[in-house]
Structure formats: C-alpha cells, structure tokens
C-alpha cells in the first residue's frame, strides 16, 4: 500500500535541463523545467535523477534534496557534490538534454517557527535553503564546511532577508574558525526549534544536545538509496517504531523518534 501511495504522489518523467553551473571543482547546480515536480515539492523532500544513458550503462538513479522549486515558472533546482560515476555523468549533461526524474519523494520538514536554528554541514545546506525560503520568519542559519572552497550555495539563494547567516570553516578561511557543531552549541540556548542536515556525526550531536535541552528538532538523514520509493528497503534505519525507510518514511525524522548513536 505504501509503495502505491508513493508512486501516486510522485511524478516520473523526462524533464529538460535548463541550466548547469559547475561551482568550484567539486559541486554542480542543475535547473530543470519540471512543472509537475516543482509544483508539489516541499522542503526536505528529494528527487531521483537518472544520469544520461543510465539504462545503457546500468546506473541507478541518484537521490538529491530539492534545493529550490519555483512553482510559477515550473523550475526545480538541485545542487550536489561531484563524486562517483553517477554524479560525474550528471555534471557532464548539457542544457537542452532530457533526463529522467522521479519525485518529489519522501517526507519533508514541518514549518519552522520564528527563532528556529538551521544547521547545515556541507552539501546538507540544500534542503535547509529550500526550507528557509518557504517562510518569512527570522531564522538563524549555520553553514559549516571544511574550507572556503566547499561553500557551494550561490549567494543569491543564501542572502535572504529573513536569514541570519553564520558561516564557519574548520580552517578559518571564511567566517568563523571551528565547526558547525561548535556554533550550534553556542546558539542552541536561544533556539525555538532546530532543523539539521549534514554528516551523520554532526546529526548525532545535534540530536543528543536537543534531547538533553528539551528543544524540538528534526534531522534529514542521508542514506544510500536504490529505488527512492520504499520498495527495496535498502535505506532502513532504526526508530521507536522499528525499522523505517529513509526514502519513504523520511528522510526527515524528529530526533525523538529516530535512533542516532544508540539513543533517541
């Protein structure tokens, strides 16, 4: 039943690639004309995109968080790190190419209240930028990476009037020196709620500290996926309700329901 519901909600089709931008040496931004997907996408959801000639090369589609969705123009944007054959092929696709896409998929974030803290580690900023753009209330946004070359978010997306940006790099080459976790712990006492996406170790700390502090929090998990609709069960994680699939029951979970590092 869940499989049928997921298929009914999602749209599988061929969509035209409108724009491509290589950001630095590691990241790629793709913009598609995908009205049916852009019109339904919610912050925290994702899409499965098939690389060019995926069938011939026997390559599975790749999951990407929705970075932006312009419902009026029907444009949908994703940003990803170029690593592995699938993302390399996608980064080589040229505007005008039609690529297969399934989406939107999964369960997204709830609406953040004013004063919420958004914590992004690396490419985990993608769903959080979409979340921030969906509301008008003031939010604190932590964007942490290893060094200045890993900032992959275009400035016109991150310079939102309701967003108080806190940049942090491990080597101090941009923003504060330190980690996203360091800044998160400093700002947590003032947070109304927390929304996070990034490396698992970062999410474990965010979940643990929020539970200890009694602050409501949600995390977007990243797992290897094959189907994106819950059929293969390859992305299951342990929760209070037993094993649940990141692709269909998530990728967003409350820290009170998902087990991270042995606790809820």
Image (cartoon, rainbow, N blue to C red):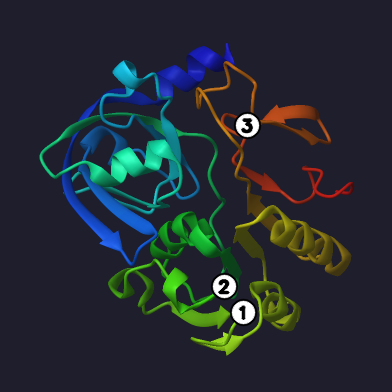
Q: Distance between the residues labelled 2 and 3?
A: 31 Å
| Badge 1 or badge 3: first in the primary sequence | 1
Q: Who is closer to the viewer here, 201 or 15? A: 201
> In this view of the protein, can residue 75 be seen by the observer?
no
Q: Who is closer to the viewer here, 144 or 209? A: 144
In the image, taking residue 243 as reference, residue 95 lies left or right, namely left
Q: Which of marks 1 and 3 is in front?
A: 1
In the image, taking residue 19 as reference, residue 198 lies left or right, namely right
Residue 99 sits in quarter: top left
Residue under pointer 1: 170
For image coordinates 32% across by 17% down, the residue present is 55
Q: Where is residue 157 in the image (x, y as percent from the top left)?
A: 33, 68
Residue 72 vertical position relative to residue 124 in the rendered view, above or below: above
For image coordinates 32% across by 24% down, the residue present is 54
For image coordinates 16% across by 43% down, the residue present is 94
Residue 95 vertical position relative to residue 139 in the rendered view, above or below: above
Q: Where is residue 116 in the image (x, y as percent from the top left)?
A: 60, 70
Mark 3 lies on a secondary structure that is loop
């Amino acid at each position: 039943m869940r499989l049928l519901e997921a298929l009914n909600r999602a749209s599988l089709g061929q969509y035209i690639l409108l724009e491509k931008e290589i950001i630095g040496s590691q990241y790629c931004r793709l913009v598609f004309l995908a009205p049916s997907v852009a019109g339904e996408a919610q912050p925290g959801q994702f899409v499965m995109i098939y690389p060019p000639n995926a069938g011939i090369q026997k390559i599975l589609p790749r999951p990407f968080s929705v970075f932006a969705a312009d419902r009026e123009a029907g444009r949908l944007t994703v940003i990803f790190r170029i690593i592995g054959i699938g993302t390399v092929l996608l980064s080589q696709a040229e505007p005008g190419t039609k690529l297969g896409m399934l989406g939107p998929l999964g369960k997204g974030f709830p609406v953040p209240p004013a004063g919420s803290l958004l914590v992004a580690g690396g490419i985990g900023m993608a769903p959080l930028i979409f979340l921030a753009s969906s509301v008008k209330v003031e939010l604190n946004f932590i964007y942490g990476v290893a060094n200045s070359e890993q900032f992959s978010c275009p400035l016109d997306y991150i310079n939102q009037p309701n967003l108080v940006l806190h940049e942090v790099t491990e080597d101090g080459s941009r923003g504060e020196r330190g980690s996203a976790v360091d800044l998160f712990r400093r700002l947590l006492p003032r947070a109304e709620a927390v929304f996070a996406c990034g490396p698992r170790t970062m999410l474990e700390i965010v979940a643990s500290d929020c539970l200890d502090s009694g602050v409501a929090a949600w995390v977007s998990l990243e797992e290897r996926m094959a189907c994106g609709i819950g059929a293969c069960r390859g992305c299951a994680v342990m929760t209070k309700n037993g094993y649940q699939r990141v692709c269909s029951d998530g990728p967003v979970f409350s820290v009170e329901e998902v087990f991270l590092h042995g606790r809820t």
